[in-house]
Image (spheres, coloured by chain):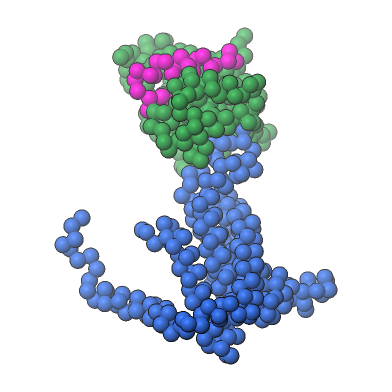
Amino acid sequence: MTTSGLSVDLKTTVNDFVLACEFEVPVGASLAVVGPNGSGKSTLLSALAGLVDVDRGRVVISGHVVVDSTKDLVVAPEKRSVAIVPQKSLLFPHMTVAENVAFGLRYRPVEDAESAISNVLKDVGLDRFRDRKPGQLSGGQQQRASLARALVVQPNLLLADEPLSNVDADSRHSLRSVMDQWRPPTQTQVIVTHGHHHAQAADLLVGLEAGRVAAFGEPRQLANDTKLDWLRDLLRASD
Amino acid sequence: MSSSIRAVPRSVVAVGIVGVTVLAVPLAAIIFEAPWAEVGSHLGSAETKSAIRVSMIVSFSAAALSVLLGVPLAFILARSNIRGKALLRTVITVPLVLPPVVTGVALLAGFGRRSVLGQLLGFGLSNSMTGAILAATIVAMPFLVLSVEGSLHSIDPDYERVAAAFGAPPLARWWRIGLPLSRSAILAGAVLAWARALGEFGATITFAGNIAGVSRTLPLEIAVALESDPGRATAVSLLMLGVSLVVLVTLRDRWIRR
């Protein structure tokens, strides 16, 4: 029996948009979230992080129940073992790159935080930029810093919203291996993506359409089975 | 865009010229009418020095209190979903539109010697420097609250949400993210509140009285001097005009350059 890394059964409404989905991901697995614009991918991440209210349902992260509407239970975002790579980076503009990366470690301490920060910055290629403010970075560099801020925490659940969309194609491959390298065996990853690499490499994939689960399964199998044209195209694409 | 199209009709420009003249003539008159040779001795007189001292203590205390009490209010107005927010905003904004003398009467009713609180404590805050500070704070704080609230609406609340996702509890999110991001707005609001406190007259004279060295601030000193020594009144007015111009220059990036 595999332990559940993430168990989701929820319904949430954000500005009249309704997201209702149900799926389960084993601990240590990666889940790619794909779907057309406005299908609810980012809303799903926000709901898992606790940044939007859930109407009803149950969410369990690595054995910890964080939402259970039958018991009126909602765990505050700061008490969930998650870290997030938001779509628009959202680095704290008044802090340096290193301070941004250190932010989460203050609340979820690790041994030798200083060298963890140096190492993750080196791995994402920003060691020379550690004292810069986000405003002095390019879009791609901001995304690397945002990724580093989340990776260094080594959370049970990593939520990433198109984490490499602004990074040049050559660097994507190496950054994907950085994401694997910083991933503890118990970490479950949920990655919203439009790219075929993350979609095909993930252990599991959920395809959303208009706030519903339109496809769920292993990417390789879905590539053959799915009746959704856009999903088949994505899963059969190559460089 | 080319300037060949007249964006503002001539008649509107003409009215505008009348408007700016009405505003500028009195200001220019102070400068021309000022007894320049005696300005130095007027400003150096014991009465003026005492009023400057009172005004500095009162206005800076009021600005500090406005920041201390007003910044949390601005965050509540901009970020929370509490019920009765419209009522809260009304209470905070009332001193902006209320005649200051009415604010003074209200202060007497609330904190004066004969108020319920005053009788309970055995003393009131009227006719004291504390009273002058309270009066100035009440009229000044709305400027700070509205200025900071306005700027908070332009700061993406997602920064604070992301901080939550990284484990920061509510107070830390406020202290480490919300507050530093609104620092320049708080500074601008504080300068504005300070300038309003410095000019406060009606509520001060009604509640705190007109006691030299205690509650006689610069505006009150001008009113007193107008009766006995108009030259000194003009000299002190010049001083306050100068201070106002410095405030405007300090904040020009926020208001003038648009």
* Residue A147 rendering spot, x and y as whole percentages: 48, 26
Quadrant in which the C terminus of chain B is drawn:
bottom left
Taking depth in this image into account, of A214 and B152 the one nearest to the observer is B152
| Residue A43 in sight here | no
Taking the spot 49% from the left edge, 56% from the top edge, the residue there is B150
Taking the spot 61% from the left edge, 44% from the top edge, the residue there is B175
Residue A92 vertical placement versus B24 (above, below) = above
Q: On the rendered structure, is B152 left or right of B215?
A: left
Q: On the rendered structure, is B5 left or right of B27?
A: left
Taking the spot 27% from the left edge, 74% from the top edge, the residue there is B12
Taking the spot 69% from the left edge, 80% from the top edge, the residue there is B211
Residue B130 in the magenta stretch? The answer is no
Taking depth in this image into account, of B110 and A129 the one nearest to the observer is A129
Residue A225 vertical placement versus B225 (above, below) = above
Residue A177 in the magenta stretch? The answer is yes
Q: Which chain is blue?
A: B
Residues in magenta, as a range? A159-186
Residue B16 vertical placement versus A132 (above, below) = below
Name the quadrant containing residue A3.
top right
Taking depth in this image into account, of B221 and A18 the one nearest to the observer is B221
* Residue B177 rendering spot, x and y as whole percentages: 56, 42
* Residue B172 rendering spot, x and y as whole percentages: 63, 40
* Residue A22 rendering spot, x and y as whole percentages: 53, 24
Outermost residue toward the bottom in this view: B228
Q: Which chain is green?
A: A
| Residue B56 in sight here | yes
Q: On the rendered structure, is B240 left or right of B51?
A: left
Q: On the rendered structure, is B214 left or right of A21?
A: right
